[in-house]
Amino acid sequence: MFSRSWSRPFSESGGVGRPAFVTEFGLWTDEQAAAAEQIEASLDEVDLVRLVFGDPHGLARSKTLTADAFRSVLRNGMDFSSGPFIFDTGHAAALDYLSDPGVGVDEIAGAGSFVLVPDPLTFQLLPHEGPRTAWVLGDEYLRDGSPHPLSARNVLRQVVARYAARDLTPVLGLEVEWYLTKRLPGPPGNAGNGFGLQGAAPQVEAVNSGYQFNLDSNYDSVAHFTSPLALKLLELGLPLRSIEHESGPGQIETTFNPMHALDTADAMLLFRTLVKQTATRQGYHATFMSLPRVDSFDPSGWHLHQSVMDATGRNIFAAEGGGISDQGKAYIDGLLARARDLCLLSVPTVNGYRRLSSEFSLSPTRIGWSYEDRSVMLRVVGGGSATHVENRTGEPTANPYLALAAQLSAGFDGLTATVGAAPSPAEGAHETLPQNLGEALEAFRAGQGAELLGKPLAATLAKLKESEFSRFEAWRAQERPAEGQVTEWEQREYFEAY
């Protein structure tokens, strides 16, 4: 008996972005470089590494590498196909990559590759049984070492830099609702599937009857899944605050303590991915789709809690004597002024607008703010150093980098007095949020989207969403579904992917 010794006549750098890519272009901070050295010293304790980035839809895209392969990828980067920038949520090609994509990024033509560079500060072991698998986020770059114009993570980084230039630090807290369901035996969904033609969604059943808000025994019905999940989240260092049963059957709310902006977005991407991984491995199906087509389900939302600290660590939203400070009100002015323009980044799917309906009294439809009122878009919460603003608009599927960038950019415009003052709570709210994806896309194109995202990413996102919405409209015209009900198209499009 013998083991074959496989010859390696080609370069060890196959699939690697470019030798010494990180060093050549000075892509890491000292902190990242130090973390990379620690990773290299510990790779013998790892079997596999998932190199991940968030695409424009906010979905995690990855390649799984052997630890040996990752040794070179860590400092050289790795080639990734531009496919995740080209396909809409149903995997239809929304950009003409064989000719002129029309977004101002030449590298998209021919579906050319970009270089994904691991961020050593995000490297961590996943708490699953089996092969020792690490997860690390990457940043997208062009081959000349410049940040990729379609990188959502870089958009958020640039917005945070605007705050840092004024010695300000945004602080954000996550409050996310999602559904746990039991997966039933059935076909894998490949029949009729293809590019822009999603097959049948997973067949599931509810895990309980729901509609006893925060009932302790309802939590017990999911605790065998959610309590070990909570321990996994803590093991990953995520600042989990609470996990509880919401209203719908098997609807879970998970909240996290405040974090800095980039950490918050990274945490959201990892959290959603880990929840879905864990559910799949245990015969369940977890979804962050806002309103699944399952009997008696209630819509899920993503509430984003926001405040800003100055250089001394003081919360600038805190006002002496209670309430919210003038700076906090200015921040609110910005959020309200940009609410329609940037709604697409917080509610990016056809299905997400089901929730923004008068049918659901605690889901915001009007653009306004108030103190401790869960029916408005912006709710001022807490007092003193804990004073903050909660935006109740978002759907849990939203790209966390773009959703956070939109909020922080709008708030920054308010703080720097580039928008006018909003009505007071007493004056009420009159203008409404977009009521469907098409209306949100129109407002995005007419508003500040390109200024925030840059023209290439704004154009790409618009094309992706136009493709998604036009496919839905074409299906609806043919099938003529009942008004006001979640459609089979939405269930196929979003239930499994999100």
Image (cartoon, rainbow, N blue to C red):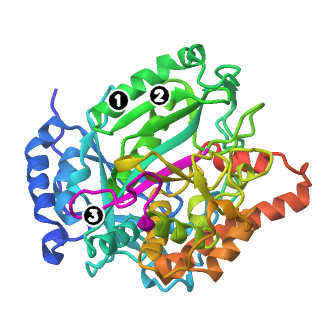
Sequence-first disc among 2 and 1: 1
Q: Are marks 3 and 2 in contact (CB under 8 Å)?
A: no
**Quarter the N terminus occupies:** top left
Mark 2 vs mark 1, CA separation in Å: 14 Å
Which label was assigned to residue 281? 2
Q: Main secondary structure of the magenta part?
A: loop
In the rendered image, residue 399, in percent from the top left (x then y), is placed at: 50, 58
Q: Is residue 95 above or below residue 202?
A: below
Residue at 35% over, 29% down:
232
User: Label 3: which residue?
Assistant: 310
Sequence-first disc among 3 and 2: 2
Mark 3 vs mark 1, CA separation in Å: 33 Å
Q: Nearer the viewer, mark 2 or mark 1?
A: 1
Q: Is residue 93 magenta?
A: no
Left or right for 261, reference 342: left
Q: Is residue 478 above or below residue 494?
A: below
In the rendered image, residue 204, in percent from the top left (x then y), is placed at: 68, 28
User: Label 1: which residue?
Assistant: 232
Q: Is residue 19 at all visible to an observer of this figure?
A: no
Left or right for 243, reference 290: left
Residue stretch rendered in magenta on the structure: 301-327
Mark 3 vs mark 2, CA separation in Å: 44 Å
Residue at 67% over, 40% down:
189
Q: Secondary structure at mark 2?
A: helix
Say which quarter of the image contains residue 423.
bottom right
Residue at 21% over, 53% down:
121
Residue at 85% over, 49% down:
484
Sequence-first disc among 3 and 1: 1
- Give the crowd class for mark 3: few <14, some 14-19, many >=20 residues within 10 Å: some
